[in-house]
Amino acid sequence: MPIQRSHIDDYTPDGRFANWLIEVFPGSSLRDLRLAVLQLAYRLSQDDAQDLRGMVVLVDSRIRPSSINNEMSHLRAVLRPDLVDRLVIYNGADALRSYDAPPELLTHEFHGYLKSLITSETSPTRPYGTTPGSGKDAVLEFLILSWLRVDGPMSTADLQR
């Protein structure tokens, strides 16, 4: 089944610094991390993104470094080398200092930007519906409310409405 370009075109990373697209990942689900990395890879594979690089920054994640390394190994096995070489996963903003990061990521300017981006993406004061995972939360709240009202069975179309 071919990838639908409209879904790729709808994707917007959380931030951009120089030629880096940045995705802030505040979760601990390996499956959700895989999705975040693949969305970024899809964006980097577009014709207008050949000079871009992608970064996923884990925030307060319980995903083990060995699991992250395994994911990157799996990505190397299935993605074009020129694409996977442009993707990195960092376990927190401070992790950049301990890796062999490119010089533009070792500046105070970048660290200030990244800390600000992480704060804005993980802030509990963001409007409802914009926090990471809020779509799942809204569906769960709706299902619980429906159950409490004894509304009976509900179709996926009802949930989407």
Image (spheres, rainbow, N blue to C red):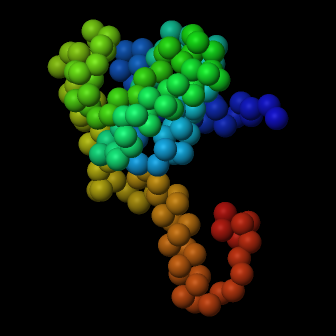
Q: Is residue 12 visible?
A: no
Query: Where is residue 16, by image quadrant?
Result: top left
The structure residue drawn at horizontal position 74% and vertical position 72%, both measured from the top left corner, is: 155
Q: Position of residue 55 (x, y in %)?
A: 42, 26
The structure residue drawn at horizontal position 52% and vertical position 25%, both measured from the top left corner, is: 73
Which corner quadrant holds the C terminus?
A: bottom right
Query: Where is residue 75, by image quadrant?
Result: top right
Q: Classify residue 17 as left or right of residue 79.
A: left
Viewer-nearest residue: 161 or 95: 95
Q: Is residue 2 visible?
A: yes
Q: Is residue 105 above or below residue 43?
A: above
Q: Classify residue 20 as left or right of residue 44.
A: left
Identify the residue at the far left of this view.
108
Q: Position of residue 95 (x, y in %)?
A: 26, 28
The structure residue drawn at horizontal position 46% and vertical position 49%, both measured from the top left corner, is: 29
Q: Classify residue 154 as left or right of residue 61.
A: right
Q: Position of residue 93 (x, y in %)?
A: 26, 31
Q: Is residue 134 above or below residue 113?
A: below
Viewer-nearest residue: 72 or 53: 72
The structure residue drawn at horizontal position 42% and vertical position 14%, both measured from the top left corner, is: 19
Query: Where is residue 66, by image quadrant?
Result: top left
Identify the residue at the far bottom of this view.
150
Q: Is residue 8 above or below residue 110?
A: below
